[in-house]
Amino acid sequence: LRILGLTLNPAIGDSGAESLARGLRSNTHLVSLNLRGTIFIKCSIGSAGAMALGDALRANSTLENLCLDCNKITAQGADALASGLEGKTGLTYVSLQGNDLGFADLNRFNSRVSAHRRELLSSNLRESALHGA
């Protein structure tokens, strides 16, 4: 299995993200993980799920694409994801569009990621910052 898409699945939540994170730590084949919701149907991944995924990213060396659009990730979860990206060389795309992040949260995520990962080709963070500055 190289691509896993569990989009539009509100049952995932933090506990599902934590289960996926446990598998991601030792997985050596998955290159793309899509856990995207929409503004109407979210996958309900919050900060606890994002923290688990961030921790798993430290151990995973094969994931290239991570889409977490339209979930319930807050600044705490985004910070954990950024920590997980430090020193990683394979991940080239991260999307956090449509989460519970303000402009300051997105700027902090971008700064942390680019400080350690100049090779991150694309991070789609727009439209998250509808609240806060």
Image: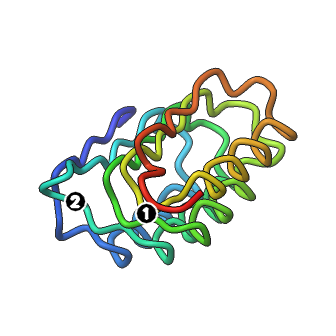
- The dot on residue 92 is none
Rounded to the nearest whole Å, what is the CA distance between mark 2 and mark 1? 12 Å
Alpha-carbon neighbours of circle 1 within 10 Å: few (<14), some, or many (≥20)? many
Q: Mark 1 sits on what residue?
A: 100
Give left or right: position of 65 versus 44. Answer: right
- Frontmost of labels 2 and 1 is 1
- Nearer to me, 76 or 21: 76
Q: Residue 46: give x, y in percent of width and height.
A: 41, 71
What amino acid type should be assigned to the residue bearing mark 2? Lys
Quarter of the rendering occupied by the N terminus: top left
Q: Which quadrant would residue 5 be assigned to in this image?
A: top left
In the displayed structure image, the side of residue 122 where residue 29 appears, left or right: left
Q: What kind of element bears circle 2?
A: loop
- Lower position in the chain sequence, tag 2 or tag 1: 2
Q: Nearer the viewer, residue 129 or 14?
A: 129
Circle 2 residue: 42
Q: Where is residue 86 in the image (x, y as percent from the top left)?
A: 80, 48
